Image (cartoon, rainbow, N blue to C red):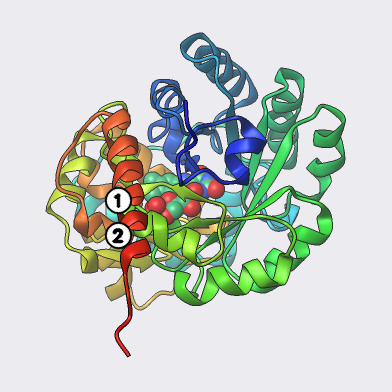
């Protein structure tokens, strides 16, 4: 088979056909389940399991399930806190600390249950302690997955261990300083994620961010992340110097995605300005579909607590909303490009139309003549 004009060094590195990677998206494992990851791999891209909140046994189970569905390479994405001070040793301990140090926040979060008619509940999931993250990483090393991705924080400590088992490491960044830090730590790829993106996001948009990161970390290759959902945006990422795209939001509407049907509806009806920046659910700036819970925090006069405190505070509320089937009260991370997406379809279709359109765009661009 002849190589596509989209073929880049990323394709050679991982032996994939298209320079498109499904972003690992956490959300309790709902956004990137094994069947979506495998579908993207089988369509010629590469899938990544978002495993940030899953305990190590579940991470292993998902890796093995994915292996049963595809023989192509795939990865695992974990949230590494920037410092282990952001890890949560124990939920009860953090709740007690919030109650003691931030009683107004604790009271406001409690009032949300009544405001939205939810029964009080506590989230019993294991906390993201340093030990919890360490065990997740150990599973990735033991299972010898081809790719490990660190969202948010600092993967420097994983790099030497990854080298030993032949696992590549990618680090996600939102500014040049973090890109330089990660390049120095030896990651194999930097993912530059712009302000447009869904989920936790920085303040710099893709047009300035990607070329600046490319220049700053050369020769470390860079992937473009944020608002890539069709051929035009894929080509734009490559034009800015990236060797591939890291795509999240566009795959939330895949038929294989496991997010709440209500959340898929919100993407379909949402305009770009409905995907807003908020710290209400996690304490770190994230882009989510606007909802009444975000509005309530905005109107409370309280500034959400820093990560990880705000997350622990709101996880109880999210657990209650989930138990009551009230997905409209749960955070729905989506990027601005959600405004362009209007229908659910198989992941293969999303991938193939992106790639085919990108090839057409490149073809057209090659014919452009500038009149002087
Ligand atoms: C629903 C959702 C969940 C996400 N969860 C994670 C995560 O757990 N870890 C991570 O590194 N990035 C996460 N992200 C960010 C993505 O990895 C990616 O950078 C982003 O989706 C790219 O922008 P786009 O959404 O415009 O395609 C998430 C994004 C979304 C939309």
Q: Which mark is residue 364?
A: 2
Q: Position of residue 10 (x, y in %)?
A: 60, 43
Q: Which mark is residue 32?
A: none
- Label 2: which secondary element: helix
> Is 246 on the left-hand or right-hand side of 175?
left
Observer-nearest of 363 and 103 = 363
User: How packed is label 1: few (under 14 Cα within 10 Å), some, or many (20 or more)?
Assistant: some
Q: Residue furthest top?
A: 68
**Is residue 53 visible in this depiction of the protein?**
yes
Q: Residue furthest bottom?
A: 372
Observer-nearest of 115 and 222 = 222
In the image, residue 155 above or below residue 235: above
In the image, residue 82 above or below residue 23: below
Give the residue at x 45% y 31%.
29
- Label 1: which secondary element: helix
Label 2 CB, ligand 1: below 8 Å?
Answer: no
> Is 61 on the left-hand or right-hand side of 69?
right
In the image, residue 370 above or below residue 354: below
Give the residue at x 59% y 32%.
75
Q: Are marks 1 and 2 in contact (CB under 8 Å)?
A: yes
User: Quarter holding the C terminus?
Assistant: bottom left
Give the CA distance from mark 1 to mark 2.
6 Å
Give the residue at x 56% y 64%.
241
User: How packed is label 2: few (under 14 Cα within 10 Å), some, or many (20 or more)?
Assistant: few
> Is 19 on the left-hand or right-hand side of 75?
left
Label 1 CB, ligand 1: below 8 Å?
Answer: no
Q: Position of residue 229 (x, y in %)?
A: 32, 51
| Residue bearing mark 1 | 360
Q: Position of residue 125 (x, y in %)?
A: 52, 31
């Amino acid at each position: 088979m002849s190589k596509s004009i989209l073929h880049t060094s990323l394709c050679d590195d991982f032996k994939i056909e298209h320079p498109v990677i499904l972003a690992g998206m956490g959300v309790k494992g709902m956004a990137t389940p094994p069947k979506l990851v495998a579908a993207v791999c089988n369509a010629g891209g590469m899938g990544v399991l978002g495993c940030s909140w899953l305990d190590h046994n579940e991470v292993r189970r998902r890796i093995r399930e994915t292996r049963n569905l595809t023989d192509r390479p795939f990865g695992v994405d974990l949230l590494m806190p920037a410092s282990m001070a952001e890890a949560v040793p124990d939920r009860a301990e953090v709740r007690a600390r919030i109650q003691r140090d931030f009683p107004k926040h604790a009271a406001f979060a409690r009032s949300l249950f009544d405001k939205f008619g939810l029964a009080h509940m506590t989230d019993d999931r294991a906390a993201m302690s340093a030990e919890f993250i360490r065990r997740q990483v150990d599973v990735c090393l033991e299972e010898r997955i081809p790719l490990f991705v660190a969202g948010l924080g600092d993967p420097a400590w994983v790099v030497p261990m990854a080298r030993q088992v032949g696992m590549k490491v990618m680090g996600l960044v939102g500014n040049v300083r973090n890109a330089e830090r990660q390049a120095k730590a030896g990651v194999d790829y930097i993912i530059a994620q712009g302000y447009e993106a869904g989920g936790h996001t920085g303040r710099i948009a893709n047009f300035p961010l990607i070329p600046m990161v490319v220049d700053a970390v050369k020769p470390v290759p860079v992937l473009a992340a944020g608002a890539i959902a069709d051929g035009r945006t894929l080509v734009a990422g490559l034009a800015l110097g990236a060797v591939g795209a890291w795509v999240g939001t566009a795959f939330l509407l895949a038929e294989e995605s496991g997010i709440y049907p209500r959340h898929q509806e919100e993407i379909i009806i949402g305009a770009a300005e409905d995907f807003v920046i908020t710290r209400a659910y996690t304490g770190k700036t994230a882009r989510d579909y606007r909802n009444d819970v975000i509005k309530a925090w905005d109107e409370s006069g309280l500034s959400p607590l820093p990560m990880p405190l705000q997350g622990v505070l709101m996880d109880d509320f999210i657990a209650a909303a989930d138990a009551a089937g009230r997905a409209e009260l749960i955070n729905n991370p989506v990027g601005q490009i959600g405004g362009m997406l209007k229908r659910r379809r198989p992941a293969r279709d999303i991938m193939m139309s992106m790639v085919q359109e990108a090839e057409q765009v490149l073809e057209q661009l090659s014919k452009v003549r500038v009149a002087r």
